[in-house]
Amino acid sequence: MGFLVKNLIFFVITIAGGILLTDCSGRKFQTTLRPLPTDIAMYGRVASHEFYDSSVFSFPLKKVWEYDASAGFGTGTPVIIGTTMFFGTLQGELHAINAETGTRIGFFKTFSPVQASPILFHSLLVYATESGKENLVAYRPSDEEEMWVKDLGGVVASPVVADNHLIVGGLNGELVSYDQFGKEEWSVDTKAPIRSSPCAWKDTVFCASTNGIVYAINIEKGEVKWKFSTGTSIYAGLTVANGTVIIASRDSSVYLVEASSGKLMKRIQLRNKIMATPSVSDSTFYVSSLDGLVTAFRLHDGEKIWQFAAKSVINTTPFVTPKAIFIASLDKFLYALSPNDGSIMWKTEIPARIKTTPLVWKNSLYLAAEDKTIYCFRSE
């Protein structure tokens, strides 16, 4: 009798667990993708990784809503498609919320941490996870259906879309190009895990791996045009502007490399390691480093324009707007700096440290903090 009772209990628990698992893993957002010209549909907003938006703010800013994600955030920024914000968590979830109001639309379990930004590819929302065998997933919210999945040994670097190609770097060292149906078009083996988000310019995609080598690859054919070695690991995403690839390395250096040839134009030595992707606007690029410094440089010659010092580590990318550069730091402060001289125009303290790059969209500023909350600020 005891044996039958134990087996009955086991059966009930198994069935209940199966129901719970099915409910948690169901791909349900109850939303349809409606792309708009104002979208921020990939990491860095565009394939070249500018981290720029034309929004204009007047200070001070006012917090208008906050969203409790009940989990921490990775290094990838949220993306906004139409009016829907999508982002992943380190607890292994993908959330969809209304970017204007902060209201939850839906979320589902990914069962592995999400470090990279999701990305819009045709009518698909593509997201990546750090581990598991299904670590690159193309999902169509309108049908609530996975269209295809891939295994790249885990993905932590945010993908890029360029010339109708989805280009993704995996922890298995492969940089792979896919079409909208999930067909592999080409792949390049970098021989080391890829933790740096690739960027693209004209007909070329640029990728770096933890062996310190940067590759320039033809987007259509997958042919390697040139290689450049920094001699140490690269974790920060790459940025390209006006024919120059900006490479931020863990050797505390920034390398300016000619995009067409791979020729070193200038090496800039900083005081500490760089973990965040540089941003760029017009003729100026911005670099944050782990000693809490943000430095503005002229793009054409690498000369320093100004420098700002926070009270703690900065491992996030400066987000650029016409009248303010937004900086987030582990000192729990969000700063708005003058693009002219780096002076503080406004700052506010957040209840937790900030490790995720701020995001600007339609005169709203979004911030994901370590207290598991996304904050939205707007001008008063």
Image (cartoon, helix red, strand yellow):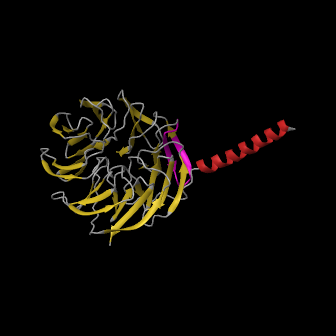
Q: How many marks?
A: 0
User: In this picture, is 336 found above or below 279?
Assistant: below
Residue at 34%, 39% (x, y): give it. Answer: 196
Q: Quadrant of the N terminus?
A: top right
Quadrant of the rendered image containing residue 378? bottom left
Residue with the most extreme top position: 191
Q: Would you say 136 lies left or right of 76 here?
A: right
User: In this picture, is 214 found above or below 165?
Assistant: above
Q: Would you say 272 lies left or right of 67 here?
A: left
Residue 261 at x, y percent in the picture? 19, 34
Query: Is residue 48 in the magenta section?
Result: no
Front residue of 135/160: it is 135
Q: Would you say 259 lies left or right of 189 here?
A: left
Query: Is residue 143 in the magenta section?
Result: yes
Q: Is residue 37 visible?
A: no
Q: Is residue 6 visible?
A: yes
Front residue of 63/325: it is 63
Q: What segment is highlighted magenta in the picture?
A: 133-148
Residue at 27%, 41% (x, y): give it. Answer: 274
Residue 295 at x, y percent in the picture? 19, 49
User: In this picture, is 297 found above or below 34?
Assistant: above
Q: Quadrant of the C terminus?
A: bottom left
Residue 144 at x, y percent in the picture? 56, 52
Residue with the most extreme right position: 1
